[in-house]
Amino acid sequence: MIRSEQVAFYSDGLLLDALFYPCAIEIAPAVVFCPGSRVTKQTPYYHEYIPRLVESGISVLLFDYRGWGESEGQVGTLFPAEQVADIRNAVTYLSTRDDVDADRLGAVGMSMGGALSMAAAADDERIRAVAAVLAPMDGKQMLRDARREYEWVELSATLAADRRNRVLSGHGEAIADLSPPTPERSRTSALSQSSIPPIPLACVEAIAEFRPIDVVSRISPRAALFIAATRDPTCPVEHSRIAYAAAGSPRRLVEIDSAEHYGTYVEHMQTILDEIIAWCGRHMAAAPAHIEES
């Protein structure tokens, strides 16, 4: 059993709810664990990852973005720039703790949380090592890949119409899903079964404009780890391959042979954890080294 401490911190004046899991080291390295899109810190498989991280000597902060879980904010919003700010403020919170080594901080993100983590690391030199697991690195391409051509044309028209309506009326519409649900999502037990609020079209538009791939080069000489599933239908492997090519050293790309998104997190948990723990242990220090890995 590991112990947790319920904590909170502010991000743009909003109180964000979090759990802090201390490891046994008196002043320890720590990572911000960044949830994926439209889920909370209560997502079941997150709580299988955290004990291994803690046992390896890394303390963990798991939090809810603004508007999600127990955090303050407009319910259901998904503006990437705001969530990146939440991650950076989580890093600041960690740096204030007496039991955390402020020179050995990192970020680990799942799915969209991985993309957000990379964007946060690009602008925040306190993040010494970052790991993105099955992450979309180009929001527009992610949304387009999930749709047939006529569906993408329809969505583009809908977003344009909603933008005009928001300007003229101050109000916008929402949709049930970010992308058409895959068969895997409908049957998975990896996610929380709590109801998910609709997503404002303004957020869909912001996600379409979110391109961590454009900024990953700024992470170097700090360390970037990309983990992908070779046949992931939700976040295709090409996202990680292109981002890896754009990133500077030290960088690493790990490809797992799998045709699932959520299932990969569960079935290949050991491999993913081994990679994250080794990467953070090697690079989460104040003086990064230039190392090329593959």
Image (cartoon, rainbow, N blue to C red):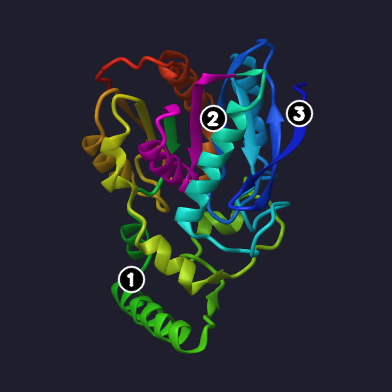
Q: Earlier in the sequence, mark 2 or mark 3?
A: 3
* Residue under the image location 37 percent in, 14 percent down: 287
Residue 224, given in percent of the width and then of the height, sits at: 36, 30
Instruction: Tell me: 26 left or right of 159.
Output: right
Residue behind mark 2: 269
Is 104 included in the stretch rendered in magenta? Answer: yes
* Residue under the image location 51 percent in, 64 percent down: 181
**Residue 20 showing in the rendered view:** yes
**Residue 134 showing in the rendered view:** no
Q: Number of labelled discs? A: 3
Disc 2/disc 3 C-alpha distance (Å): 21 Å
- Rendered position, 222 above or below 86: above
Q: Nearer the viewer, residue 135 or 4?
A: 4
Residue behind mark 3: 4
**Mark on residue 148?**
1
Residue 117, given in percent of the width and then of the height, sits at: 45, 40
> What amino acid does circle 3 point to?
Ser
- Rendered-image quadrant of the C terminus: top left
> What amino acid does circle 1 point to?
Arg
